[in-house]
Image: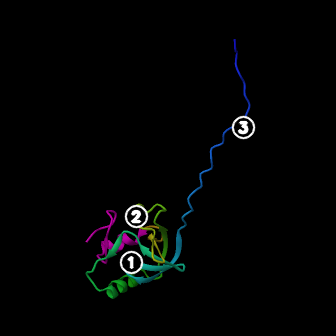
Amino acid sequence: MTIGVLTFGTPKVPKAVPKPAEIKDIKGRLTVLTANSFKVDGTSIVLCGVRPSGKTSAENAAQSVKLSYENAYVKCRPVGGGTPCDGKTVATLGASTVAQCKIDGALDLATALTDSGILCGTIPSYKSC
């Protein structure tokens, strides 16, 4: 008759799962390059989920964005960090980071530019043309 067997051994420890690289927001003053591309704190940014509307020339569209938003304080969240574009677009475009940018942490720049007709949404979160 066996009453019980007690064994000692090294407990199994679950393997550590590496965390994905932390995606950091890019914050700073906005320098307009085109209607949907900017420099923020030395980083080249392309707005996610939008494209030029084609209703006006590229130069006029960029000028309109400059008049309204040049030097505004923005916080840009790269794709993959919790944007409406996650899983719908690439995270980089050439040397540029694709991101959602908010002015003063509240106004989504892509929403403002699609609502005004300067840009067109390419994902359902933004107004299409």
The residue tagged 2 is 85
Magenta-drawn stretch contains 31:
no
Amino acid type, residue under disc 1 in the picture: Asn
Which amino acid type is shown beneath numbered disc 3? Answer: Thr
Please tell me the numbered disc located at residue 10.
3
Q: Secondary structure at mark 2?
A: loop
Question: What's the distance in space between the residues labelled 1 and 3, CA to CA?
Answer: 57 Å
Marks 1 and 3: which is nearer the front? 3
Check the image and name the residue furthest to the top. Answer: 1
Q: Nearer the viewer, mark 3 or mark 2?
A: 3
Instruction: Indicate the secondary structure of the residue bearing disc 3.
Output: loop
Which residues are the magenta region? 107-129
- Quadrant location of residue 54? bottom left
**57 vs 119: above or below:** below
Which structural element holds mark 1?
loop
Q: Position of residue 10 (x, y in %)?
A: 72, 37
Residue 42 falls in image quadrant: bottom right
